[in-house]
Image: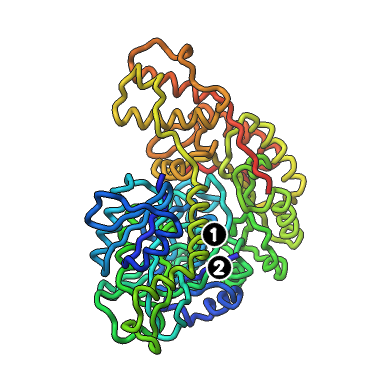
Amino acid sequence: MTAVHLLTALPCEAKPLVDHFRLKRQMGEAAFAIYSNENISLTVSGIGKNAMAAATAYTHLLFGKQTNSVWLNIGVAGHLEKPIGTPFLAEKIYDADSKQSHYPSFVTPQPCDSQTLSTFSQPQTHYPESSLCDMEASAFFEIASRFSSSELIQCLKIISDNEENNADKINPKQVSSLIEKQLPLIDTVIKNFTELTNSLPATVNEIPLLLSDRWHFTTSEQRQLKELLQRWKLLSPEQPIEESSLPSTSNRKELLHWLKEKVDSFDIVLESKER
Amino acid sequence: MIDTIYIEEAVFEHPRTKSILDRFPKARQIKCERYGEVFNPKAQNFRLQKQNPSLILAEKFHGHLQEAPLGYSIGAKKNYYFSHMLNCLYDCRYCFLQGMYRSAHYVLFVNFEDFQQEIRQIVAKKNDEEIHFFSGYDCDSLALEPATGFADSFLDFFATLPDNALLELRTKSTQVRSLLERDPLENCVVAFSFTPDETARALEHKAPNVQRRLDALKKVQDKGWKIGLRFDPMIYQNDYHSQYEILFETVFQQIDPALLHSVNLGVFRLPDNFFKKLRNLYPDEILFASPMESTRGMMAYKQEIEDEMTQSCQEQLLRYIPREKYFPCTY
């Protein structure tokens, strides 16, 4: 199940990632070049905020609208003076058009330095005083945070140009090389995020057949039932619901009442966690 | 401990900001316009953020003081609470803050003096009427004391107020040095919160254990400060009766009745929407699988459990304290 979504603006940014993660091109996808393996997807958006916003939303839909996925925008960026090849995570993403700022949350250990990242609609001839600059990050963050939580969304940018080495001097091969050199760092960032998302517990999402075969629940009843099953699982994990113990009623409300009475009668023993 | 600090641009030069930044020289500093940009966005997961919260230094412009909910009292008719800080260093699973805020970051309002000015205005209006000011409502009053100097500042301030204006510091912390280094104030109560050891181990993550809290309480009491005891929330478990019996016995062995100001007791309850959010955040938490029911928008233990717990713990408590020092939480 794909839980990590990588987005790049350019095919040359994507290439080393496709090779490294052994991603396969998704056939039949014409709007964007999309690659994936079992756990990771990679979408190449094209340049600019609109393209990135569309690609982020498209990726979310294509991979099943999962919650708590990891979203990572990887690409190159400019800076007034930072050396070419230096990687940075975005600590603040400033949209130069809307003047709005976004703040990814830093929960996991950070394997590289961080900087403010400003996103512009047009290529910049002058670098901002104290931030990285790109053309996609604010749109990426804004859209990705509709689908996941800000602790699981990041932009990793590698300096490709500065005042001494202007953007028009770089070619796609050099961009690929800059990304390729940071693959160990990218591995670490993905590993940290994956551990973080795996720390979230699973909940009861399926209603067992022994119940759904006999009773047809409304949406509201399904919600109540899942809550009761979750409580049952927590309070009496050793004693699953057995068909023979179920009441003979065909009335759904009576069944829910029976379940509630049963769960309310379980022992409550809080689990100690030693400090 | 804190590796990222967001700072509102307007308070960047504030002396309190500078002293806090000096305490965390390695922390990444990120400027923001208003703290809400970081604290309020919808796409945040309290549970994930609580693994490594950041500090936000901000300024509070209005609403420094709020009237306390009815039933939130330790003897005065007029009760106010104020929050120099939002969120707590500790991670108590029953805490309503998890339901109230989207973010687990700590917001510290550095303009203490504006809170103090509003307190002074309220006190001036009420003449001799007893007024209580609660500081540990949206945070622990002392947990971040070495960095914030909150108690130091507010104790200096309350020392200038008449005795009818009383400050409650509410804490689970052992950060009591600022109290031990000064003479006790007549108009301050240092209130320690307790649950039985088994509950604390299961639910009060990152907080000092019961014995360490008691050790801190003892030191504060020996220095002559008035003490409060807060058994709120009471948490239900099968063995709750004997657990609270042991807790009360352990605590009251240490208490000097002459310095005991007040004791309160309140059963676990949360507004329905907070409870729902907490259960979604922690579906693996047994506390939220307990037998609860919603009444008038509040989720609490089933009435028979609540009544039994209240009666049992109240009876036990009143063996140790006079009734006039007992204040059940009824809000």
Residue at the spot 52% in from the left edge and 48% down from the top edge: A199
Q: Residue B78, percent across and down?
A: 47, 56
For residue A112, the mark is: none
Residue at the spot 41% in from the left edge and 68% down from the top edge: B35
- Label 1 crowd (10 A; few <14 / some 14-19 / many >=20): some
Q: Residue B136, percent across and down?
A: 54, 57
What residue did someone put label 1 on?
B52
What's the residue type where badge 2 is placed? Asp
For residue B3, the mark is: 2
Q: Nearer the viewer, residue B3 or B329?
A: B3
For disc 2, the chain is: B
Dot 1: element:
loop
Work out whether mark 2 precedes mark 1 in sequence or the reverse, and give the earlier one: 2
Q: Residue B49, percent across and down?
A: 49, 56
For disc 1, the chain is: B
Do the residues at discs 2 and 1 belong to one chain? yes
Q: Nearer the viewer, residue B97 or A1?
A: A1
Above-or-below relation of A8 to B11: above
Q: Does residue A90 appear in this view?
A: no
Above-or-below relation of B76 to A122: above
Above-or-below relation of B201 to B225: above
How many discs mark residues in the rendered view? Answer: 2
Residue at the spot 59% in from the left edge and 56% down from the top edge: B170
